[in-house]
Image (cartoon, rainbow, N blue to C red):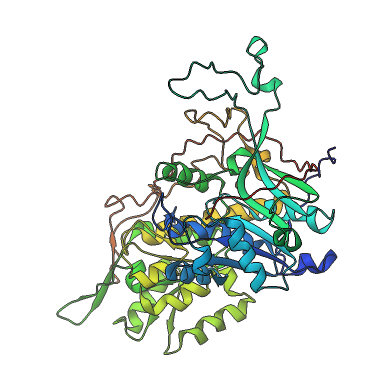
Amino acid sequence: MSAPKRPPSEEPAEIPMKKMNDMKDKRNVVALILARGGSKGIPLKNIKKLAGVPLIGWVLRAAIDSGLFDSVWVSTDHAEIEKIAKSFGAEVHIRSPEVSKDSSTSLETIQEFVELNPGVDVVCNIQATSPCLHPFHLRDALKFITEDRYDSVFSVVRRHQFRWKEVKQGSCEETKPLNLDPKKRPRRQDWDGELCENGSFYFATTSLIREGQLQGGKMAYYEMQPQYSVDIDIDIDWPVAEQRVLRYGYFGKVMRLMFCKVSGCLTDGRFNFSASGKTSVSIHSRDIEGLRRLQKEGVTVFLLTCSQDPIGPALVKKLSEKMGFEVLKVGENPLVDLRSIMKERGLKWNDVAYMGNDEADVIWLNLSGLSGVPVGAPVDAANAAKYSCQQAAGMGAVREFSEYIIRKKREAESHQAAGIDSGNATASSNAIDPGNATASSNAIDPGNATASSNAIEPGNATASSGSIDSGIEMASSNDIDPGNPSASLNDFGSGNGIRGCFPRHSKKKGNSSQC
């Protein structure tokens, strides 16, 4: 028996952590991402950068920003994964050697977590390799637990693929169709397809988990659209996933303020001294254009200098006058200066983007809602950053990071304004069968109701060039192209799938493979 389809609900603005649980259901609900260090297919897959962000960072961002969970956890046995998980704001469960083996199952690890956290009532096991997960997916699925009193809910995707019985090599047996009648082969539009687990997430009560099940009791499934159903197991999946996540991934909340270091980010860190004692720095025109685009998007930009920078008051004034940005010289305790700016504007760190380039920036890279570093940044800084640029300092990195912030901002605004699954609202009518791995689609960016897939062109030729006699030498806009390598995207995802939640009753047990 099927329950009626749950109607799309409005996308909330910002929901404080725990608020949704406090409204109707007092149970302790946590998110748990399993991420051991011994991945066989792709070494340290869970923290490998996907579109500039550690793979696990995509699901951590969605889980934390959803505001659904009393806490968000990462279960790992690896120090680097632990460090990155904490940088995104997650708590860490250090799993025991007994559940860190190649033969260990996800269920065993989750059971260990539940034993160590007896106050937890509901666990949402989120797969780190599902980077296109959005907060609304989790929100709508959790309603089956908190409102409709289901015991378990798991994600599925609709596939339109005809299946045939496998015949072993050398066997005299003939193959047979498993889900079609070849004499009455249906057209795609005349066939509802089949629902398949996509492994994105599994909600289950802890009482069910203690019984040895992730799926059981009163069960429901939550159907995700194909474009959000991405899984990464082998290297060949990576470039496809990277293109898909740039089109359909969750880019977080709206950024309202950006702090950007001058030395080592906006410039390459070098200073030129003349015989007369004048100091000059070189700044790429594309980077300036990137910051100006941020301003047009309503993001306030502050350029940061410090006492160690040989930039005198006169040059600071020229930077501000010629570029149109406020330049802030931070003191011995930068935290005080930055917090003062944020307090004046009523902002929290989650509203702030920060671009740094060295170990000294690690604390700000960790605190900020979005943070970036140029290519070649020290390991500690790169690990703390939410985004690693492909371009170098002073040669387009700021422009690249600015474009990334704009994509995030538009995605977040689109979700808040639309109040529905944006994949339905804007997907191209020419999108084709998502089950066809060789087909391409011209579906537009579902996070931007008005933009085409080329709406943001990081290599925009309108960036000005030339030199400023104030001592700020502007590099030619033709020197490099810091454009996003994903500017031209060919996705397979159809936007015509149904975003529905159709629960069904069953007593089937199921364990997912170890992550």
Looking at the image, which residue is at 56% across and 42% down? 445
Residue 353 in sight in this render = no
Residue 323 in sight in this render = yes
Question: In the rendered image of this protein, does residue 353 appear above or below residue 219?
Answer: below
Locate residue 316, reporting x and y percent. Answer: 37, 78
Residue found farthest to the left: 275
Front residue of this view, candidates 39 and 499 = 39
Front residue of this view, candidates 232 and 373 = 232
Question: In the rendered image of this protein, does residue 354 appear above or below residue 443?
Answer: below
Residue found farthest to the bottom: 332
Front residue of this view, candidates 452 and 165 = 165
Looking at the image, which residue is at 14% across and 80% down? 275
Locate residue 201, reporting x and y percent. Answer: 64, 52
Locate residue 373, reporting x and y percent. Answer: 39, 66
Question: In the rendered image of this protein, does residue 5 appear above or below residue 132?
Answer: above
Locate the N terminus by quadrant: top right
Looking at the image, which residue is at 55% across and 50% down? 513
Locate residue 327, reporting x and y percent. Answer: 43, 76
Looking at the image, which residue is at 81% across and 49% down? 218
